[in-house]
Structure formats: C-alpha cells, structure tokens
Image: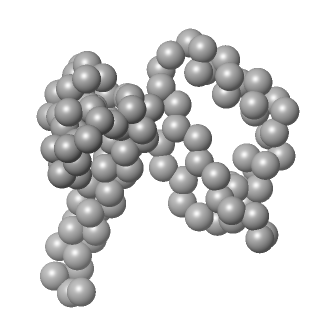
Amino acid sequence: MNQPLRVAIADDERDMREFLDEAMRRLGHQVVAVAATGRPLSEYSALEIKKAVTGYGQAEKQQVNTMVKALLNVEEEVETDASDALAAAICHLNTRMFQKAVEESAGGGKR
C-alpha cells in the first residue's frame, strides 16, 4: 500500500458525526484498508483527551486550546480544530508513554 495513512479526528458534535457517517458510506473501503495494515488503531473519547491535556474531562474548548499552546510552547493563536487535533495527539503520546513504562516495569525494568 503506497498511499499515505490518513486519520480523521472527530468531536462529539452531531454535524461531525453525520459527516463521518456519510464519509464511511462513500469511502468505507479506504477505512478497511487502514485497518488491514495491521497498525494499531487507537480511540479516545473527548473526556479522555480533555483530561489528558487539562486534567479535567469537562474542560471547555478554550481551556484545551490554552493548555495545548502551553504544553507545546506556542505563543501565536492556534485554531480550535488544530488544537483539538493536537490535544488528541498529546493524549495518544501520554497513553503510549504510560503503556511503555508499565511494560518496562512488568519486565523487571529491562529496556
């Protein structure tokens, strides 16, 4: 498979769910192709993402935006959609780092 891997990040908003539902109907075969690569797929709820970035699962979008900018040391404005995507990436990175630490701990600290 020589095509780039594409990832969609969606909010809990009704319009986005409807858009993704339509995209899945039209492009479902491409989604199956991603799953068929054997790469691990991860899914995080909005609550998990917000909690990973702000420490509070019910944080407002502006709070998430502010924390993303602070964590990444960005001074200029970041669009809400971009900060949502970055927040999901931060959540994933934190999750993977935690999983790796647990695996290393269970293996007696071997690296």
Q: Residue at 26% x, 41% y: name it.
A: 76
Residue at the far bottom: name it. 110
Classify 51 as above or below 90.
above
The percent coordinates of residue 69 (x first, y second) are 22, 42
The percent coordinates of residue 21 (x first, y second) are 71, 24
Q: Residue at 39% x, 32% y: name it.
A: 79
Residue at the far top: name it. 14
The picture quadrant where one finds residue 2 is bottom right
The percent coordinates of residue 102 (x first, y second) are 22, 65
- Quadrant of the frame with the C terminus: bottom left
Q: Is residue 95 visible?
A: no
40 relative to 75 in the view: left or right? right
Which sits in the foreground, 41 or 13? 13
The picture quadrant where one finds residue 101 is bottom left
Which sits in the foreground, 98 or 109? 98
86 relative to 22 in the view: left or right? left
Which sits in the foreground, 61 or 78? 78
1 relative to 10 in the view: left or right? right
Q: Is residue 17 visible?
A: yes
Which sits in the foreground, 10 or 111? 10
- Quadrant of the frame with the N terminus: bottom right
Classify 44 as above or below 5.
above
The percent coordinates of residue 95 (x first, y second) are 30, 54
**What scheme was used to colour the molecule?**
one colour
70 relative to 103 in the view: left or right? left
Classify 66 as above or below 97.
above
The picture quadrant where one finds residue 100 is bottom left
